[in-house]
Image (spheres, rainbow, N blue to C red):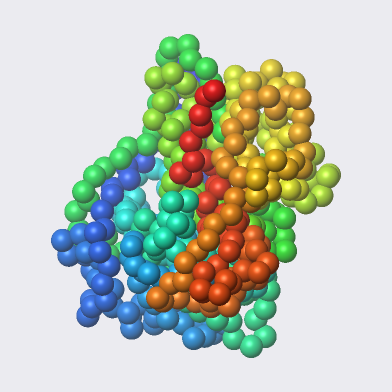
């Protein structure tokens, strides 16, 4: 064990033993889904996911939800899904207890290690009555698809409404659990088929002198429907936490946030975070990826200062030379990002931040609400206020009238021909702060 003593030691109280950050290895076995159909048995045949709809509805039944239904929306179809609550990729442990989304279903002790199987090409999308204006839509065809990566997946849409008396926060909590249950149910079908590809994630000990990079991953923890869940625990209840990147890939982080849809991190976005993917790919080549710091975005100044101080300190404990910082949401969370950038730089760590803009329709308005001179390496992931005209769809899954109440819908929203005038803010994950967008930078 002496050869590892130079590496940061991370102890998880819920594990049976101490684990060095560089010793975790995850094999993600990918089953590539080409189509989804309803049938008599839930299974995968020739890369087609077949769903027994009645059985799945039975599995998802809840005394707090009603009017439940399951639908399928394929890329290119004239379908709109609105209002969207969450998007998840079905994943399940092949070894261990065979659980999914640790903290909800399955043991958290082997998260990030062993073998996990995923259904790539399809997602579970939850939809239900609008609770807050900060929800969004997915169109399966038209201009929306240029900005929404969820449009390129086969969406297994689970719709449900709350029973009388279930409102607000409880409604959203029920929808979060519904999505996790649906993804876990579908993922079980992957256990009886062979994977098409195996992707191995690990960050082994780096023996050469490379820049040590930590990722400070800001997640919503503001209450009032602005929440994330780490291992099934509301992030409002946690301090900043150091994780191995594999734990994020292995479904430790679940979205329950109703932030503006355009910059929302769905659970799928957490599972496939491109910053983590890129740093893992480059580990041992030109960087030494030393870990992820989960930093809750809280609304109050005292909590912001607490999370900022602890997050920077954890990056220092990981002996990081530099940090990458991404936010979720906008406005209030930009204060968190700037505090982190300022104190990381003052602590001697080079810092890069990812931010989206609210720069007005023409891009000339003040784009962010807070700034600091130390944040001099910033990546824009796009302008939330960019305007789109969405054509009418032949079919709507959910509640079409919710569209004009979404944050980012223009006034008037619906035009005479049935089209909708909106901004990118209504399109789920269109300006995702992790950089999982279809925008690119240009050097002048």
Q: Position of residue 95 (x, y in %)?
A: 31, 52
Q: Position of residue 94 (x, y in %)?
A: 30, 54
Q: Kindly give the residue lying farthest to the front in the view shown.
A: 416
Residue 251 seen: no
Percent position (x, y) of residue 370?
77, 38
Above or below 164: residue 39: above
Q: Residue at x 37, y 69 (%)?
A: 78
- Residue 143 in the image: above or below residue 416: above
* Residue positioned most to the left: 46
**Residue 5, placed above or below residue 168:** above
Q: Nearer the viewer, residue 331 or 273?
A: 331
Who is closer to the viewer here, 308 or 84?
A: 84
Pick out the residue farthest to the bottom.
164
Quadrant in which residue 306 is drawn: top right
Residue 114 appears in the rendering: yes
Q: Is residue 86 left or right of residue 334?
A: left
Left or right: where does residue 33 sit relative to residue 280?
left
Q: Quick one: quadrant of the N terminus?
A: top left
Look at the image and tell me in which quarter the C terminus lies. top right
Total tally of numbered discs in the picture: 0
Q: Residue visible at 74% across and 27% down?
A: 342
Question: What residue is shown at x 47% (from left), y 57% (from top)?
Answer: 144
Image point (36%, 41%), residue name: 26
Location of residue 189 (image quadrant) = bottom left
**x and y percentages locating residue 113 in the rendered image:** 39, 43
């Amino acid at each position: 064990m002496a050869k590892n003593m130079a590496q940061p030691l991370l102890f998880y109280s819920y594990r049976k033993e101490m684990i060095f950050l560089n010793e975790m290895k995850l094999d993600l076995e990918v089953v590539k889904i080409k189509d989804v159909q309803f049938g008599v048995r839930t299974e995968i045949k020739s890369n087609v996911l077949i769903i027994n709809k009645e059985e799945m509805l039975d599995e998802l039944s809840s005394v707090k939800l009603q009017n439940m239904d399951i639908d399928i929306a394929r890329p290119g179809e004239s379908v709109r899904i609105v209002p969207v609550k969450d998007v998840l990729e079905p994943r399940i442990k092949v070894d261990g207890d065979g659980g999914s989304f640790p903290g909800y279903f399955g043991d958290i002790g082997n998260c990030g290690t062993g073998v996990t199987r995923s259904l790539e090409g399809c997602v579970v999308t939850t939809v239900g009555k609008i609770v807050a204006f900060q929800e969004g839509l997915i169109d399966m065809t038209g201009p929306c698809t240029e900005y929404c990566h969820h449009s390129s997946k086969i969406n297994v849409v689970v719709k449900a409404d709350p029973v009388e008396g279930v409102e607000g926060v409880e409604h959203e909590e029920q929808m979060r659990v519904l999505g996790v249950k649906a993804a876990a149910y579908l993922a079980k079908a992957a256990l009886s088929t062979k994977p098409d590809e195996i992707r191995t994630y690990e960050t082994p000990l780096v023996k050469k002198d490379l820049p040590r990079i930590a990722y400070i991953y800001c997640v919503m923890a503001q209450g009032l429907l602005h929440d994330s869940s780490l291992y099934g625990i509301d992030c409002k209840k946690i301090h900043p936490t150091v994780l191995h990147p594999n734990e994020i890939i292995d479904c430790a982080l679940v979205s329950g946030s109703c932030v503006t849809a355009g910059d929302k991190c769905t659970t799928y976005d957490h599972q496939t975070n491109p910053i983590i993917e890129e740093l893992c790919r480059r580990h041992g080549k030109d960087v030494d990826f030393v870990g992820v710091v989960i930093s809750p975005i809280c609304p109050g100044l005292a909590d912001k200062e607490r999370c900022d101080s602890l997050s920077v300190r954890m990056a220092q404990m990981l002996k990081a030379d530099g940090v990458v910082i991404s936010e979720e949401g906008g406005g209030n969370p930009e204060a968190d990002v700037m505090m982190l950038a300022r104190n990381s730089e003052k602590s001697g760590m080079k810092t890069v931040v990812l931010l989206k803009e609210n720069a007005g329709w023409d891009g000339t308005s003040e784009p962010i609400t807070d700034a600091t001179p130390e944040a001099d390496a910033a990546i824009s992931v796009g302008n939330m206020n960019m305007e789109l005209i969405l054509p009418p769809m032949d079919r709507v899954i959910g509640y079409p009238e919710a569209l004009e109440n979404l944050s980012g819908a223009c006034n008037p929203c619906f035009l005479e021909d049935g089209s909708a005038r909106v901004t990118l803010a209504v399109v789920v994950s269109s300006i995702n702060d992790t950089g999982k967008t279809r925008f690119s930078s240009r050097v002048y």
